[in-house]
Image (spheres, rainbow, N blue to C red):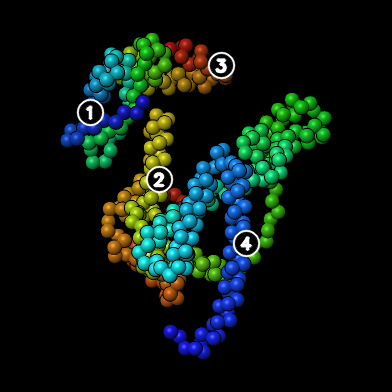
Amino acid sequence: MVTDVLHPGKSTVPKTEIREKQAKMYKTTPDVIFVFLFRTHFGGGKTTGFGMIYDSLDYEKKNEHTHRLARHGLYEKKKMSRKEQKECKNRMKKVRGTAKASAGAGKK
Amino acid sequence: MAAPGVLESDFSSAVTLLKNLQEQVMAVTAHVQALTKRVQAGAYPTEKGLSFLEVKDQLLLMYLMDLSHLILNKASGGSLQGHAAVLRLVEIRTVLEKLRPLDQKLKYQIDKLVKTAVTGSLSENDPLRFKPHPSNMMSKLSSDEEEEGEAEDGQSEASGKKSTKSKKYVPPRLVPVHYDETEAEREKKRLERAKRRALSSSVIRELKEQYSDAPEEIRDARHPHVTRQSQEDQHRINYEESMMVRLSVSKREKGRRKRAHVMSSQLHSLTHFSDISALTGGAAHLDEDQNPIKKRKKILKKGRKKKGFRRRR
């Protein structure tokens, strides 16, 4: 859905507050609600963004983008150091085709 | 009283006119009596017809009645001054005038109905039947292509259909035309375009409004660049909201938007008038503030190395 937030006189409302408000409006818990891409209009006072409400946590974990799940703490991205990334890439360069997948990450 | 000379010349014409009048009145009376008999006998049933036409009928009849009453009054020597029938006539006439555009709109339908009533039913292949026929809207070209495919390749109809669906688009081969435009023609075209632009400028528009009889329209008219930009903005917003994405705005877009915003916020149109020299024949004068001279962008030659930080355009 498209969410319009009116906040005259205040700065942009943080996403957590918006989620709380939406939970109250739609009578759900705030963990199934995801809001993103908020842009404040020129002059302040109005912000427009998008929101999504899932039926259950399972659907949410399966269908939502990982970076948004990460914002809620439900997903951890594995952080490879720069050195490791480059070593992975160089190992992959030696192999052709589907073997790249096993060669690269496997030898870690 | 008029002089006796005039009276005598008028006498003969008056007698002939009166005789004509009498003949015509007798013919009309006979006609009207026949019509009345037929209507009373119920030869013209109007329950299932167009109520609009029925209203028109009744109005015309009332008009005739009032008119004949007034003629009778006048013929027996009375005056028409302030007669109630005159007001009624005026009212009926106004209503009839207002009904005329409706008549125009119904004209096609009424003609079709009359034709159907006269000739019986329409033929099967009549392209102007009442109901829409979606089967007629299917493209006839696909069937032609199929036939050609069958004839040439000898394939079955199913594979013929598939081949037409997956056929690569071949652009039509156009015959190149010789380019013949001379300098004079180009000048003429430029002049034409300048004239058209001048005609739609604010000066000429105001003159037109002054001399035309049409009622004055007050519109929220904005600068054409602004309306174009606001339309594009609206399109962008619609896209963003329906796809739930945010589109990036390039530098050019930002510049255009800024220019449009500036143009709408300034009182630009108060002091700057567009150039109507195309119509008046004078020399074209360019207002410096209006048309800033566009700086030509340097076209970098290939292989030319630019030292240092290259500014992103």
Amino acid of disc 4: Ala
How far apart in space, not on screen, are marks 3 and 4 (Cα)? 104 Å
The disc numbered 1 marks a residue on which chain?
Answer: A
Check disc 2 and report the residue beneath it: B231
For image coordinates 23% across by 38% down, the residue present is A44
Q: Are circles 1 and 4 on residues that touch, CB within 8 Å?
A: no
- Mark 3 or 1, nearer chain start: 1
At x 67%, y 42%, the residue is B116
| Front position in the image: B277 or B181 | B277
Identify residue for label 1.
A13
**Residue at point 72%, 39% (across, down):** B123
Amino acid type shown at disc 2: Gln
First in sequence: mark 4 vs mark 2: 4
Q: Which chain carries label 4?
A: B
Residue B15, percent from left and from top: 58, 77
| Quarter location, residue A14 | top left
Kind of residue at disc 1:
Val
Q: Do labels 4 and 2 share a chain?
A: yes
Helix, strand, or loop for circle 4? helix
Residue labelled with disc 3:
A98
Q: Residue at label 4?
A: B27
Q: How far apart, in angstroms, are the residues tagged by discs 2 and 3?
A: 49 Å
Observer-nearest residue: B224 or B128? B128
State left or right for residue B128 relative to residue B95. right
Dot in front, 4 or 2:
4
Q: How busy is the neighbourhood of tag 3: few (under 14 within 10 Å), some, or many (20 plus)?
A: few
Q: Return the chain for callout 3.
A: A
Give the Cα separation between the discs numbered 1 and 4. 89 Å
- Residue in view at x 60 percent, y 42 percent: B42
Q: Nearer the viewer, residue B285 or B89?
A: B89
Q: From this viewpoint, which residue is outermost toward the front?
A: B76
